[in-house]
Image: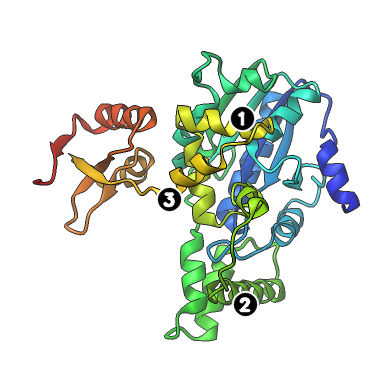
Amino acid sequence: MRLRELLIENLDRTGESKNAVVGWGRGMGHKGHMMLASSVLTQAKDDGADPYFVISKTMGKDDPLSPDEKLDIYNQVFPNNPKVFNTATDEMPDLNRVLKKLATMGYGNVTVVVGADQVNAFQYLVRPDKSGVEPYKQFGLDDLKVIARQETNDPSREEEGPRATPMRQALLDPNMSDEEKFQVWRDSMNPEIDDEKVKQLMQTALQRMQDFAKPKVRVKKDKMAAENSRNPDLMSPSDYDRYQQNQMDYEKRDFKRREMEHELGHEDEWQRQQDSKPVVVGRYFYNVPAGREDEAASYGIKQTKSGKWSKAKYNKSGRTWGFQKDLADKAFGNGRYWEPKK
């Protein structure tokens, strides 16, 4: 294990406060992710707290830059904060275990800063689980709140950051010239990242996307492969998003905690859950005004091909789905239900 990973597992304090402000995510390293990082620093300063920003170790065709490459970007944009930015480790592969580590370091109050479209996804941290106790208290913290970066006093709070999807699409678009592709990336990255570095990142990202797209030889899974498939560090971006969404479900969060405590032993049941596909049993349709599309998406409301907005109900929809629907009803009025003819 490298020296830097050993230091990260110890999570050297960035200050002497009892309060911490934390940012977490994958992040392609574009301006939008730098806005989130800047918001963490601003909120920490306003609260008199210690800032931390941890970069997930996930990689895949939708997230082609390595954690170390992204870490270099953060350090170039924020050169005066070397202890703040870290990559996740084997000991701390997810936000839950980062929070548990902060508790062992003496922090009592933590603020988690995320994008506006992720606030609801992280509410599982502050809602009581089946045991009746909020997860953050189980981690050893006294108090925790989740806020959007737009709620901070950071100068970027009213700015809309770029998206990673157009950056990836540009690299693969045969109709775009090299100059046009570069301009997409140049406009998406902070000015602290010079042109040569941007071109290097483009080449690296393109090569990785092509490598990830290559068909892989299927091999028989053994027990270790099954365990690795549940390791957040080794998940694809789509699997990681499902993993994060699973945290919101009470029963799945309960399984995740057992996994964190090394109480595995239900591989067969877990595999059945992974193999079974949910079936749509109905939809709730909503009137979503222009300008509120992101808010609708945060409640699981998606636009259909016909242009209507609906929230699908699955045969496996549980408490989390119901919680999101309640929020959607409050925001856009009670949804109109439709179910397919049998």
Residue depicted at x 58% and y 70%: 186
Report which residue position mark 3 lands on. 275
**Residue 77 in view here:** yes
Q: Position of residue 13 (x, y in %)?
A: 83, 33
Q: Earlier in the sequence, mark 2 or mark 1?
A: 2
Q: Amino acid at mark 2?
A: Gln
Q: Position of residue 261 (x, y in %)?
A: 68, 30
SS type, badge 1: helix
Q: Position of residue 81 (x, y in %)?
A: 79, 45
45 sits left or right of 226 in the view:
right
Label 2–label 1 contact, CB within 8 A = no
Q: CA distance from mark 2 to mark 1?
A: 38 Å
Q: Amino acid at mark 1?
A: Arg
- Of 124 and 221, nearer the camera is 221
Residue depicted at x 14% and y 36%: 337
Q: Position of residue 329 (x, y in %)?
A: 25, 29
Residue depicted at x 28% and y 46%: 279
- Of 148 and 316, nearer the camera is 316
Residue 258, label in figure = 1
Mark 3 burial class by Cα count in 10 Å: few <14, some 14-19, many 20+: few
